[in-house]
Image (cartoon, rainbow, N blue to C red):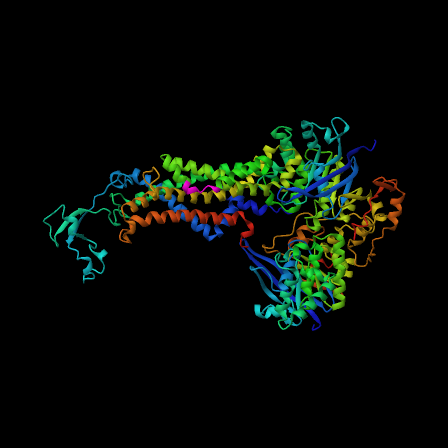
Amino acid sequence: MSDPLKIEDSKRKNSIFSPVVQKNWYLFRQSKMGLIGFFIIVFFAVLAIMQPLFFISGYWSNNIYDPVVGYDSIEVELVIVKCPRNSDFPTEKYDKPEDCPGDGEISDRMVMPFAPNAKPGDYYETFLQPAPPSIKHWLGTDSLGRDVFSQIMKGSQVAFMLGLLSATLSVSIATLLGTIAAFWGGRVDTYLMRQADLILMVPQLPLLLIMAALYRFQVWHLALVLGILGGFGGLVISVKSQALQVKVKPFVDSARVTGGTKFKIMTSHILPNVAPIALLYMVFAVTGAIFAESTLSYLGLLNIDMSWGMMIHLAQTDGYIFSGLRYWWIVLPAGLSVTFLSGGFYLVGRGLDDVFNPRLRKR
Amino acid sequence: MSDNLLEVKNLYMNYETLEGKVAAVQDVSFSISKGQSFGLVGESGCGKTSVAMSLLKLQADNGFIDSGSIFIDGTDIVPLEEKELRSIRWNKISIVFQGAMNAWNPVIKVGEQIREALREHYPENTKHINYNKMVSLFNMVGLDDSVLNRYPHELSGGMKQRAIIALALSCDPKLIIADEPTTALDVVIQDQILNELKKIQENLGLGVLYISHDISVIAEMTDNMAVMYAGRIIEKGPTKDLFANPKHSYTKLLLESTPSVVGEKKKLYSLDGKPPSLMDEIQGCSFSPRCPNPTNDCKNGLIEMGLIETENGHWVDKCCVNCG
Amino acid sequence: MDKINVVEVNNLVKHFDIKSGFFSSTTKVVKAVDNISFHIGKGESLGLVGQSGCGKTTTARLMTLLEEKTSGDITYYDKKTKVLTSLDALEKEDIQNFRSQVQMIFQDPYESLNPRWSIMSIITEPLNIHNLGSADDRIEAAINILTTVGLTPANNYLDRFPHELSGGQRQRVSIARALIMKPAFVICDEPTSMLDVSIRISIMDLMLDLGRDLGVSYLYITHDLAVARYMCDRIAVMFNGKILEISETEELLNNPIHPYTKRLLSSIPVPDPTYKRVKYHLDFKEINEIIKSSEGTDMIEVNKGHFISTKDFSNELI
């Protein structure tokens, strides 16, 4: 009898990964979305890792580049101009009121308290805060002179830690509860489902707002709350439905006939088969966590030094959000980072869907 | 030649998959004439369903006909475009799919779904004409008129299958393909439906292509048959001849591995292993690894393949002309 | 040696309550298994034949305690106490013992093995559960049984996963796992219906040989009478939860009495194009005579070992 397993052998020898992982990776590669998402995540992960490396290697000095307490003073000379009255616009130099003072210029009214004798045409030396992107600061500095790029990297660290921590927590809890609900059924099941319904009903953001108002939230607290809330909520229902599908498979019956205890069957048969789907949900849970953090920080409710949400918060309180694209480096990087990283995780989730849901696969 | 409803000549078809090219159909040739029934027998993965789908050019998106010709009522459909095919599909040749019972749209009444087919092919028909036609179709398959107004979930498995047959007959085709038409049905219902099919075929002078893995069904329902293995036809000819005098080792094995409720209780034989992967290039006979009596040439892969005619109309792969 | 019964089923009943409505009140009762009785002797195989929905799979699930019976008695011969013991009489610990004596082989080779477990883990799970032997003993037992079921060289298969095996090989693994504990009784639920026709016989032969060597009794469930003929010493024909006819195989095929059996037999296609099947039209005359002469018992013996149900089915069979 010819050995149908010979082909598998050659693939096996060449890799440290099991054939199952190899096959899944191959399938994942087919999904363009999944790959794009994967690379986005890798990009941000690299950012997160690079930051301490930059500091340790001395490439960046703490004084200047620390995202929270760094300060860089960039001297600049500005020309003092007298801006026309609003009714005089447009003039030959300026089209709209916002154009005055333009780049490299400063209005005489601003200078007056410091240099009462200054006249239009004089030069005024000052520190540029925020400074536009330059070789020294790839994304410029914010209004406090801190390097924006460094802040993005720090935010990346926060996002990953928060995201992964809360996602792992919620998925672990949900998987356990969902499997118990599916396998035990009866009252246990009913209770867990009603509990999940209850948590589903509660709107997440208002709840977080209230909790933040009552306690001083730090990132860890947020991760914990999100994790537990998520773990007892709707995720339990999804996991339970998955576990139910596994429960009726013949190999579970087979284990029951052989005499396996409920607990043993649950842990050795059902949980491993539910785990892949749980992994999928985890990816989506991360995006939720990142958004929750950004929102809370933006509203100023999170006790955190630096994160993407905090960057946007500062941008807002300093009034830069409505400055149009003039100070884009203060507003855009943080916002785009949140979008892209969340999007990256989502795309990876879609890619994983292809792997775990064979029916969706292209031939 | 002109009297043939269907003539397949040297058909090659493959699927492009992520893992490579799968040669699903290799050098398949056979023909069916008016009023004849033909059986295509083989096990899972032998290519019989791929052949069926190719006949209607309904193969999957990643399936391509490499070469060969398929003459339906004299016209080669292989080079035809989708537009031209539409006038041939269902009008000249139709199909009862495998698991067709589950092919009904659950939210549309059965009669409406058949009317859709009629409207597509006979746009000039009035509602009245279509209705009468549907009633007569249903009577032909043994269903009551009232079934036209029911939803698919209200019908039993047997009724759904009969309705599928009615649907296949709706546009007066000359040839019907029945792909495992009675799998998943109870034996008694299966018998009834097969009898209906036989009567319909005789009354309308249809050609029928039966595809099945069950040689008993093929034995009872077909005039001629072909046995497929790993994408190729390895033996074909009149059904009675093949059963009385099987030449290929695989054919013999199929016959010897089927238990029967009549006759003496015999010792039965069977194989181990599974058919070869259709992705690899196979040298020589694809059956030789599992053949119970391979010759040295068979094992070396030096044997020449291709069907030759032994007796009148009875063809077998060259290698097995004198299989021991 | 006396013909001892390994299994005795008496008046087994299973009702399913169909609950519907807002308050989940019971609207209908489905009599999946409606008062059946049979026995299986040592080393004997009984075929349970019927069409879909007749209750044969439910019967199998009742006998392995996968479902709870509504009423009736299931009795097994206990190797240890050497006495026929009813399942009702067993304490919790004894149920574990019973589970080592009764095994089941399922229909779907693709779903009856956990895709994440290695073949080694799958086959030795029964030994694990019942805490038999050391780790080395278990590996040895696994190798032995793999060799016995024809998966050689056994060492090659221990670390494989189910998706690497063909359908036939997976069923062999299922058989190996069922027989590793040397049970007295194995229930087979259509184990070959999802396999290629050309390999079915080899699987069935394997089960027959092992049955003979190990003295295992089988309850073989199938819808295919031809397969039942090949595998079974006796056959019971089931319909709507009831056993209509039960007798030795050849006797049943040559001399069917119940109209349902006759109709079933006459509907099966025959692999011989020259054979003319005789169409059978339902005729209840003969059986009504027999029912009349019975004294109100459920089953009446018309021939040695050949029993017929005395219930009137003329309404249910169209």
Q: In which quarter of the image is the N terminus of chain C?
A: top right
Toward which corner of the image does residue C30 lie, by quadrant? Answer: top right
Q: Is the magenta stretch mostly helix, strand or loop?
A: helix
Coordinates of residue A158 in the picture (x, y in percent) = 37, 40
Is B119 on the left-hand or right-hand side of C242?
A: left
Name the one closer to the observer, B192 or A269: B192
The answer to which of A254 and C65 lies nearer the viewer is C65
**Depicted C155 relative to depicted B168: above or below:** above
**Residue C154 appears in the picture as rendered:** yes
Where residue A43 appears, x then y in whole percent?
Answer: 38, 47
Magenta-drawn stretch contains A202: yes
Identify the residue at horizontal 24%, vertical 38% (top origin).
A63
Q: In this view, does C120 lie to the left or right of A229?
A: right
| Place of residue C141 in the rendered image (x, y in percent of width and height, measured from the top left) | 65, 33
- Give percent across and percent down for residue A30: 49, 52
Left or right of C222 on screen, residue A47: left
Which residue of the protein is positioned furthest toward the top in this rendering? C81
Between A238 and C257, the one nearer to me in the picture? A238
Number of on-image labels: 0
Q: Give the range drawn in magenta.
A: A201-206
Closer-to-camera residue (A251/C202) = A251
For residue C205, say whether it is visible: no
As for residue B33 lying within the magenta part, the answer is no
Report the residue at 38% width, 45% height from top. A44
